[in-house]
Image: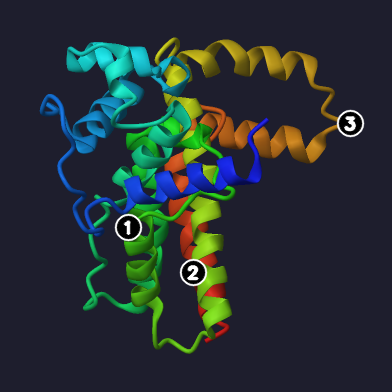
């Protein structure tokens, strides 16, 4: 089991990797010149995770994609866990600023919309625990931009943070549903699923026992030709959520 000193050393190494472009360059080490950079390794890992999912992401797979031996990759990143942290931060770094000229309501909706878009583009992010993620420049800069989008609208510092957290949590939950829907429709379209399932449900559900669920569920299924509508639910939900947050300003 790692000691306290080991954990401190690991945390120090990870922070140095995350903030590598902001720290003074280290003196060149002796030996063969490295042919790759940490950025190369992270980019290759993101591409693999996007294609195959994070469960299949290994140091060996990344090394093969880069055309190097697996052991040589450990000179760039110390572990798969550290690599994933770097990947999360690199994805966050691509999030552009929210235009300041937008109305405040649109800026708040953009916070959630961009989180959702990121998760849909990189579904493996949903499998990474958001708890105790070490802050790198990518995630911190995005948080700075999110705060800037709602700075000056009348929320306290604590309320600003909570507003961003609520918008992020809503976008994440909706993205999880959208990703699940995309995976299901890859096997069978929602329309075909409903054509099969709808009549079967109508036969087995006792209408006197579930009058509201039966009526509303049938209406929803026939309208969407699917179990739900993640895109529509997001548009409706984020607008309602933002309007509620703005009542506190």
x and y percentages locating residue 32 in the rendered image: 12, 24
Q: Which residue is mark 3?
A: 209
The residue shown at (64%, 31%) is 218
Q: Residue furthest front?
A: 30
The residue shown at (19%, 32%) is 40
State if disc 3 and disc 1 touch (CB < 8 Å): no
Q: Nearer the viewer, residue 144 or 132?
A: 132
Mark 1 neighbour density, 10 Å: few (under 14) some (14–19) many (20 or more)? some
Q: Which residue is mark 2?
A: 242
Looking at the rendered structure, the secondary structure element under dot 3 is loop
Q: How is the image coloured?
A: rainbow
Residue 202 shows up from this direction: yes
x and y percentages locating residue 23 in the rendered image: 26, 58
Sequence-wise, the earlier of marks 2 and 3 is 3
Above/below status of 18 relative to 67: below
Q: Which residue is mark 1?
A: 137
Question: Which image quadrant for residue 38?
Answer: top left
């Amino acid at each position: 089991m790692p000691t306290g000193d080991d954990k401190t050393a690991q945390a120090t190494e990870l922070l140095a990797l995350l903030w590598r472009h902001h720290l003074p360059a280290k003196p060149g080490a002796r030996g063969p010149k490295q042919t790759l950079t940490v950025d190369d390794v992270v980019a290759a890992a993101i591409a693999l995770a996007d294609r195959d999912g994070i469960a299949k992401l290994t140091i060996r797979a990344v090394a093969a994609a880069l055309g190097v031996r697996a052991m040589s990759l450990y000179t760039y990143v110390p572990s798969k866990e550290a690599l994933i942290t770097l990947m999360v931060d690199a994805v966050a770094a691509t999030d552009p600023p929210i235009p300041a000229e937008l109305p405040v309501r649109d800026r708040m909706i953009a916070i959630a919309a961009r989180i959702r878009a990121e998760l849909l583009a990189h579904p493996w992010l949903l499998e990474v625990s958001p708890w105790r993620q070490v802050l790198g420049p990518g995630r911190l800069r995005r948080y700075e931009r999110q705060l800037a989008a709602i700075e000056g609208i009348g929320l306290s510092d604590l309320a600003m943070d909570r507003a961003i957290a609520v918008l992020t949590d809503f976008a994440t939950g909706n993205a999880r549903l959208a990703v699940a829907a995309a995976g299901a429709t890859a096997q069978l379209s929602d329309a075909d699923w409903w054509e099969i399932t709808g009549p079967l449900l109508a036969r087995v559900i006792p209408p006197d026992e579930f009058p509201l669920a039966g009526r509303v569920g049938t209406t929803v299924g026939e309208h969407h030709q699917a179990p739900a509508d993640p895109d529509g639910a997001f548009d409706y939900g984020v607008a309602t959520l933002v309007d509620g947050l703005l009542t506190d300003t």
